[in-house]
Image: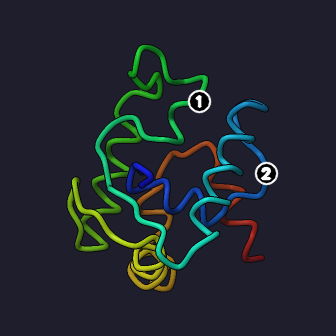
Amino acid sequence: MIYLRPHHGLCIHHFIGKGYSDTFISNMKNIINKLESSDTSIITLVSGGDNICSSCPNNKDDKCLSGQKPDYYDMACLELCGLNFGDTLYWEEFKKKIQTSILEPNKLKEVCINCEWLYICENLYK
């Protein structure tokens, strides 16, 4: 079981090996490998810190130094995907919801407004 903030589904989708630190990048790669290694990988959507946040330098005493931005990203992602905190589902199912509810209707900018990494996600499609 992997605990995942909802918006991290988007981060994983667009991950190209860049991040806050070498430790963060290594952890992200490890989590992606676990998720993609099986069609039956299960996630639980959580509010606040998750398995990705655990290696983020912006995570201090289980508080995100980015303030309310990640909370907004999570809420927007949940609303568009029709999900709730605490939902447990297969990773593949969550990926499909992200694709059909956010990426295909071109709503990424609505979810990730003011994200410092948004330029990477946008450039992947040019």
Left or right of 111? Residue 89 is left
**Nearest the eye: 105 or 87:** 87
The residue where tag 1 is placed is: 56
Quarter of the rendering occupied by the N terminus: bottom left
Give the alpha-carbon distance from disc 2 to disc 1, as whole Å.
Answer: 14 Å
Q: Residues within 10 Å of mark 1 (few under 14, many from 20)?
A: many
Eyeballing the image, is 61 above or below 91?
A: above
Give me the residue at 31% from left, 47% from top.
46
Quarter of the rendering occupied by the C terminus: bottom right
Coordinates of residue 45 in the picture (x, y in percent) = 32, 55
The residue where tag 2 is placed is: 17
Coordinates of residue 68 in the picture (x, y in percent) = 34, 33
Amino acid residing under circle 2: Gly
Give me the residue at 66% from left, 63% from top.
14
Eyeballing the image, is 113 above or below 19?
A: below
Amino acid residing under circle 1: Cys
Label of residue 102 in the image:
none
The answer to which image quadrant residue 21 occupies is: top right
Left or right of 37? Residue 44 is left
Give me the residue at 77% from left, 46% from top.
18
Give me the residue at 65% from left, 47% from top.
28
**Could you tell me how many numbered marks the image carries?**
2
Eyeballing the image, is 123 above or below 25?
A: below
**Nearest the eye: 107 or 60:** 60
**Nearest the eye: 97 or 40:** 40
Which of the colour schemes (rainbow, by chain, secondary structure, one colour) is used? rainbow
